[in-house]
Image (tube, helix red, strand yellow):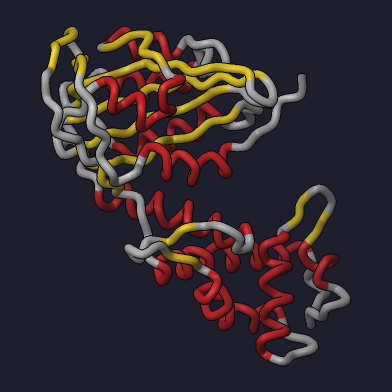
Amino acid sequence: MARTRRSSMLGLALSVALLGSVGVVASGCSVDATGSEAQHDTEATVFTPLGVSTADEVADAVEEILNEQLDKCIEWAPGVDLVTPDNIRDFTHKGYMSYNGLAEAIEGILQTQGLTEIAPDDLRQYFRGWALPLVETGEDGVAIWNTAPLVIYYGILRSNRNNAFDRAVDPEGVDIEQLAEQWDLVTDGSMLDHDFILPVKVSKNPSLAEIRQQVHGRWVDEWSWGYDAIDDFWQSQEGPEGHPAFEPIADMLGSAGITKRYYLFAGGYDYGPWTRNYLVVIDEHDQMYGFMMGYSE
């Protein structure tokens, strides 16, 4: 069966699913790093996302992305002095590489500015102004993605990730941004679905039922907790499968600053077989974050 890589599309979906700010009322067992303790607490835990962005922040991120793509296109097409509707594709495509987001931005800029041609470097002054009106926001002013160009979606991902790392407080023995960068090494080249689950602030110790609901609803089961959860996720099939680059992550997650660790698994057969392996941790600053890796057709 062919395996497809959809990590970027999963990123925002997991941000919505796991990073939702609405608490879920649940009672049951809360499992910590040393064992299971029954909790009879019916007060909802509030999950407050640290990785959210305003429209202005997203526009800044999109501008950054488009400038990076433009630099590449200028490098591989040095003979293009003017970009026109007729040569946009040639300018933004080379072999298997293509920057469709930049192509769409150029088309939009030419149209909104009433231009028939433009020098490549002159595009830079228009990127942010092109992007900002395309960023949709919810009632709370947080940027969301529905039908905007994909480059807007990638801008949301970049901005959310940057904001999450800026707002999160590193616990003892852990660099959260370094965790994410190391995870990129674990998943580099993988055709499995994968994502780093951005930090959220929890109002109190969430119950296992609440964590399950935030991660993947009723389909997810707890497989192990504590230090075993790290190893079980590391060795999981259609997960890291013992990848040596996961070792620095395992070392950090074994630090005293991490107070709870859960390995969760979900799987099923809807439109095709799928699996999801999750490692979710809570730290001494009441922040929850983690990793996802799995397979779907």
Q: Is residue 120 left or right of residue 247?
A: right
Task: Tell me where residue 228 appears, x and y as whole percent.
Answer: 32, 7
**Image quarter of the N terminus:** top right
Q: Horizontal placement of 247 versus 110: left or right?
A: left
Q: Nearer the viewer, residue 223 or 261?
A: 223
Residue at 83% across / 66% down in the picture? 89
Q: Is residue 171 left or right of residue 83?
A: left
Q: Which image quarter: residue 159?
A: bottom left
Which residue is found at the position 29% from the left and 22% from the top? 209
> Could one spot residue 211 in this view of the protein?
yes
Residue drawn at (45%, 16%) of the image: 265
Camera-side residue of 276 and 220:
220
Q: Residue furthest bottom?
A: 114
- The residue lying furthest to the left in this view is 40
Give the total of numbered labels.
0
User: Which quadrant is home to the C terminus?
Assistant: top right
In the image, 32 versus 125, the foreground residue is 32
Q: Is residue 107 above or below residue 101?
A: below
- Which of the pair 74/92 is nearer the observer? 92
Left or right: residue 196 compared with residue 29: right
Position of residue 214 measured from the top left corner of the image (x, y, whole percent): 35, 32
Q: Does residue 173 appear anywhere in the picture?
A: no
Q: Is residue 207 above or below residue 289?
A: above
> What is the quadrant of residue 24 in the picture?
top left
When the figure is inspected, residue 16 is found, relative to residue 266, above or below; the finding is below
**Residue 73 locus on image (x, y percent):** 72, 65
Q: Is residue 292 placed above or below 62 in the rendered structure?
A: above
Point out residue 13 in the picture as x, y percentages from the top left corner.
49, 42
